[in-house]
């Protein structure tokens, strides 16, 4: 009693003599003055529910003022999350990326996953660094890789006009399981006389070196076409 606060009027009902105000609405409006989609923020988990977790965001002064954002279950981790409470507890300090702001509804969407390094990128940069020369692995032979479905894709690539050779490179196992489905990535780094392609399924990664004079855009079209026919 007697404490001065700043609040926003959110409802006026003269008939029932009711005036509803919100201090949180003022803090939210102020937060919107410096928060933008893509910003990295720090905060504290204040609630864990079946569909995600609520995080109280530290504002510019580094303090908690009750401005909360929701981290949807799908944005908690790169790993598969069975239940949010298996990963987070109330009071946990976290770092998140702002992924959405709805000023009309007063909602902030956050992602813990996007604040972490993509495990695929981490693996490519560490376990499978791009060589300055073609990999020393053997030329491809049917059944030469244990990744289910990759043999079919490699066979299709070998039949493409303009692709001179397909060679298996390095293999690695990563710590995260993002998807059990076979995924194909065209490495962005330039390598002599062709391209590095990385295939991933579960924890397994397989590097495939393609010798070709095709351009990068042409190679992308080839991969999209082959994947559409084989996956």
Image: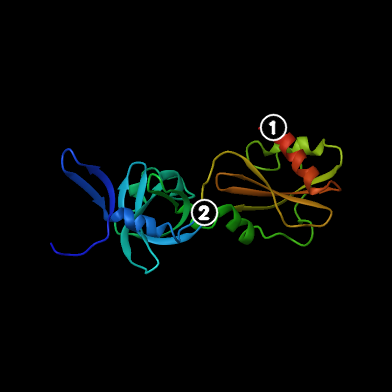
Q: Which x, y percent locates residue 157?
A: 78, 38
Depicted 224 relative to depicted 59: above or below: above
Residue found 52% across the figure and 56% down from its top? 38
Residue found 54% across the figure and 42% down from its top? 179
Q: Relative to the observer, which residue lies in front, 19 or 67?
A: 19
Secondary structure at badge 1 equals helix
Q: Which mark is residue 228?
A: 1
What is the C-alpha distance between the residues marked 1 and 2? 28 Å
Q: Which x, y percent locates residue 108?
A: 41, 50
Q: Quadrant of residue 132?
A: bottom right
Q: Decide if residue 163 is on the left or right side of residue 178.
A: right
In primary-sequence order, the first of circles 1 and 2 is: 2
Q: Decide if residue 75 is on the left or right side of residue 216.
A: left
Q: Which x, y percent locates residue 63?
A: 33, 66
Q: Relative to the observer, which residue lies in front, 207 or 98?
A: 98
Q: Relative to the observer, which residue lies in front, 11 or 78?
A: 11
Residue matched to label 2: 175
Q: Quadrant of residue 83?
A: top left
Q: Decide if residue 149 is on the left or right side of residue 118.
A: right
Q: Relative to the observer, which residue lies in front, 189 or 1?
A: 1
Q: Residue furthest left?
A: 1
Q: Which mark is residue 177?
A: none
Q: Which x, y percent locates residue 73?
A: 41, 44
Residue found 51% across the figure and 51% down from its top? 176
Is residue 98 visible in the rendered image? The answer is yes
Depicted 149 relative to depicted 137: above or below: above
Secondary structure at badge 2 equals loop
Q: Residue furthest top?
A: 229
Q: Quadrant of residue 104?
A: top left
Q: Decide if residue 169 is on the left or right side of residue 52.
A: right
Q: Residues within 10 Å of mark 1 (few under 14, many from 20)?
A: few
Is residue 89 visible in the rendered image? The answer is no
């Amino acid at each position: 009693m007697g404490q001065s606060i700043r609040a926003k009027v959110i409802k006026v009902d003269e008939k029932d003599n009711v005036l509803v105000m919100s201090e949180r609405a003022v803090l939210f409006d102020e937060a919107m003055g410096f928060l933008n989609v893509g910003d990295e923020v720090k905060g504290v988990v204040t609630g864990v529910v079946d569909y995600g977790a609520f995080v109280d965001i530290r504002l510019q002064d580094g303090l908690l003022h009750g401005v909360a954002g929701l981290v949807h279950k799908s944005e908690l981790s790169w790993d598969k999350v069975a239940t949010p409470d298996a990963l987070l507890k109330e009071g946990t300090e976290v770092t998140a990326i702002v992924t959405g702001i709805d000023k009309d509804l007063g909602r902030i969407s956050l992602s813990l996953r996007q604040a972490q390094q993509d495990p695929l990128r981490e693996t490519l940069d560490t376990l499978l660094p791009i060589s300055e020369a073609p990999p020393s692995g053997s030329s491809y032979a049917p059944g030469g890789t244990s990744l289910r479905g990759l043999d079919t894709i490699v066979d299709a690539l070998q039949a493409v006009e303009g692709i001179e050779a397909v060679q298996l490179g390095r293999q690695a196992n990563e710590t995260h399981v993002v998807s059990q489905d076979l995924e194909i990535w065209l490495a962005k780094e330039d390598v002599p006389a062709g391209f590095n392609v990385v295939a991933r399924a579960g924890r397994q990664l397989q590097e495939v070196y393609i010798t070709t004079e095709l351009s990068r855009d042409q190679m992308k079209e080839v991969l999209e076409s082959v994947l559409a026919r084989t996956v």
